[in-house]
Image (cartoon, grey):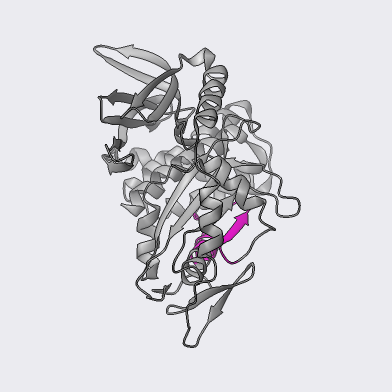
């Protein structure tokens, strides 16, 4: 089993970006431009590496390789995005890798691109941003470039990537160190662990709350210690946790509502299945059903939302009450969009940079709501 934190260190130590890995400060697949650039890099790395894995490491300062981290990104449906936009798509996974020096809410993103091994050429299936459908990308050194002629794919990286992966194998010392770090950092949130198949060490910590015969958890942090991968992290949402000897299940709830009348709605069920052959797989199922509200009531809230958004754009002073209402601005736009008000999605995008500059609590809520939309869209 590969220790993903050690793998990232070994990739960063290998003389900067090259034809088998790329590093980014951040990736934004919530915009057309960000999505297009991400697809370009996946396509080029896939084509240039037909016989070995290739990687994108996210949360790295390009100039000095400083590990600064990014927000936890739990999009289990990223393969659906790849399949929608690429012909002959590779198998792609996104993992959140824990580093001890980073804040609890920051990780390093690791995108793993597995080879197709069938000599097919990956290309854009349709137009996106300024890239045309049918475009083929390849890596030239550290640059992803379009190619418009017949391509001869050569194996140039398999030996070196194999050596890097071999040097990144987990061992008992790394597992014990990771376990110790997790317990120490999570001591205020009832840390627990379970060993699956006498091999996989899974740790979780959370704040429990009992409602009737059910126990819900908030401030949830779940890690697979063997790989140093954070499987789940949330400050706001609540989850149910169940497990047996072979499986660990997480049912995530999201809080939605108007003004102060909020309810918890099931969003996604994630099952981590551990196998006897020292492998595991993760299955996710969207179980979300959008809350429905009266159209007249929604229009009332939307009019007020638009007024707040206008003041943000004009940098006008907000009253204390309006400052408080700003936290729910993105939630109202989200609910309106789910109830058929299509232009509310554009308003969400407009609000994103404005809230990032002026209201961090409201910006965090907006990011959570955009994550819900992303999951719905990919499903």
Q: Nearer the viewer, residue 340 or 119?
A: 119
Is residue 100 placed above or below 109 in the rendered structure?
A: above
Q: State the residue at coordinates (54%, 55%).
A: 163
Q: Is residue 304 visible?
A: no
**Quadrant occupied by the N terminus:** top left
Residue 25 point in image, percent of width and height: 64, 51
Q: State the residue at coordinates (56%, 52%).
A: 164
- Residue at the right extreme, as displayed: 64
Q: Nearer the viewer, residue 300 or 229?
A: 229
Is residue 7 placed above or below 326 in the rendered structure?
A: below
| Magenta part of the chain | 19-39
Magenta span has 339?
no
Left or right for 290, reference 8: left
Q: Is residue 210 visible?
A: yes
Residue 348 point in image, percent of width and height: 49, 48
Left or right for 193, reference 288: right
Left or right for 172, reference 92: right
Magenta span has 22?
yes
Residue 109 point in image, percent of width and height: 54, 46
Q: Nearer the viewer, residue 154 or 335?
A: 154
Residue 280 quadrant = top left
Q: Nearer the viewer, residue 279 or 148?
A: 279
Q: State the residue at coordinates (41%, 40%).
A: 300
Q: State the residue at coordinates (32%, 51%).
A: 340
Left or right for 65, reference 347: right
Residue 259 quadrant = top left
Q: How many marks?
A: 0
Residue 218 point in image, percent of width and height: 43, 22
């Amino acid at each position: 089993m590969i220790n993903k934190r050690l793998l990232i260190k070994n990739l960063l130590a290998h003389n900067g970006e090259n034809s088998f890995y790329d590093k980014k400060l951040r990736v934004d697949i919530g915009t057309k431009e960000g999505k297009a650039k991400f697809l370009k890099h996946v396509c080029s790395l896939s084509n240039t590496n037909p016989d070995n894995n290739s990687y994108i490491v996210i949360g790295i300062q390009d100039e000095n390789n400083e590990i600064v981290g990014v927000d936890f990104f739990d999009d289990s449906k990223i393969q659906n995005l790849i399949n929608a936009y690429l012909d002959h798509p590779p198998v792609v996974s996104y993992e959140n890798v824990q580093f001890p020096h980073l804040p609890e809410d920051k990780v390093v993103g690791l995108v793993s691109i597995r080879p197709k091994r069938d000599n097919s050429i990956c290309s854009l299936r349709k137009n996106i941003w300024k890239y045309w459908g049918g475009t083929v990308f390849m890596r030239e050194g550290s640059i992803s470039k379009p190619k418009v002629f017949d391509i001869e794919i050569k194996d140039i990286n398999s030996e070196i990537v194999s050596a890097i992966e071999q040097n990144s194998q987990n061992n008992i010392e790394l597992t014990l160190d990771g376990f110790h770090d997790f317990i120490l950092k999570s001591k205020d949130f009832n840390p627990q662990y379970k060993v699956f198949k006498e091999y996989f060490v899974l740790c979780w910590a959370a704040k429990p709350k009992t409602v009737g015969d059910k126990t819900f958890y908030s401030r949830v942090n779940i890690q697979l210690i063997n790989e140093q991968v954070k499987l789940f992290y949330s400050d706001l949402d609540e989850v149910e946790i169940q497990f047996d000897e072979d499986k660990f299940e997480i049912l995530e709830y999201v809080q939605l509502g108007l003004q102060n009348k909020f309810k918890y709605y099931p969003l996604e069920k994630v099952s981590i299945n551990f196998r006897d052959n020292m492998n595991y797989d993760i299955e996710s199922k969207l179980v979300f059903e959008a809350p429905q509200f009266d159209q007249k009531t929604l229009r009332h809230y939307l009019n007020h939302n638009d007024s707040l958004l206008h003041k943000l754009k004009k940098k006008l002073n907000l009253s204390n009450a309006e400052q408080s209402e700003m936290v729910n601005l993105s939630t109202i736009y989200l609910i309106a969009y789910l109830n058929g008000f299509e232009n509310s999605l554009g308003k969400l995008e407009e609000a994103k940079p404005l809230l990032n500059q002026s209201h961090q609590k409201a910006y965090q809520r907006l990011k959570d709501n955009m994550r819900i939309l992303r999951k719905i869209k990919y499903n």
